[in-house]
Amino acid sequence: MENNLDIGLNEFKKMKSNDRDILIYNNLVSIRKKMGDYNFNKKIQYTWLSILTVVIGLKKFIGL
């Protein structure tokens, strides 16, 4: 990974407890950010599809 959060199991076991906690926390923050970005993009996609459906429906049924 580009953020150095991906390490091997042996290296993880050799780390101090505090360092392990920080690494786990940073991994969780990274995952949450990715999920947040995904949910935001999903909202944009649903909005775009709704607008597109309305416009196509208006063109087809009303003839605009």
Image (tube, rainbow, N blue to C red):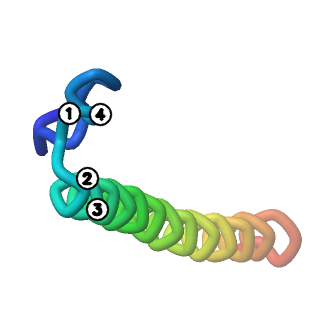
Residue closest to the eye, 47 or 25: 25
Which residue position holds label 1?
14
- Return the disc, 2 or 1, that comes first in the chain's sequence: 1
Give the residue drawn at x 25%, y 52%: 20
- Mark 3 residue element: helix
- Residue, disc 4: 13
- Could you tell me how far apart the alpha carbons at marks 1 and 4 are, in whole angstroms? 4 Å
| Disc 2: which residue | 20
CA distance for labels 2 and 1:
9 Å
Verify CB contact (< 8 Å) between mark 3 and mark 2.
yes
Q: Which of marks 2 and 1 is in front?
A: 1
Q: Is residue 56 left or right of residue 11?
A: right
**How many angstroms separate mark 4 from mark 3 (CA)?**
12 Å
Q: Bin the neighbour count of mark 1 within 10 Å (Cα to Cα): few under 14, some 14-19, many 20 and up.
A: few
Nearer mark to the viewer, of 4 and 3: 4
Secondary element at tag 1: helix
Q: Which of marks 2 and 4 is nearer the N terminus?
A: 4
At label 3, the amino acid type is Asp
Pinpoint residue 34: horizontal percent, then vertical percent.
38, 58
Label 2 amino acid?
Arg
Q: Which quadrant would residue 1 be assigned to in this image?
A: top left
Mark 2–mark 4 distance (CA, rounded to whole Å) = 8 Å
Which residue position holds label 3? Answer: 21
| Residue 53, horizontal then vertical, whole percent | 73, 67
Q: Which of 60 and 34 is in front in this view?
A: 34
Q: Do the residues labelled 1 and 4 touch (CB within 8 Å)?
A: yes
| Among numbered discs 4 and 3, the one appearing first in the sequence | 4
Asked which secondary structure carries label 2, the reply is helix
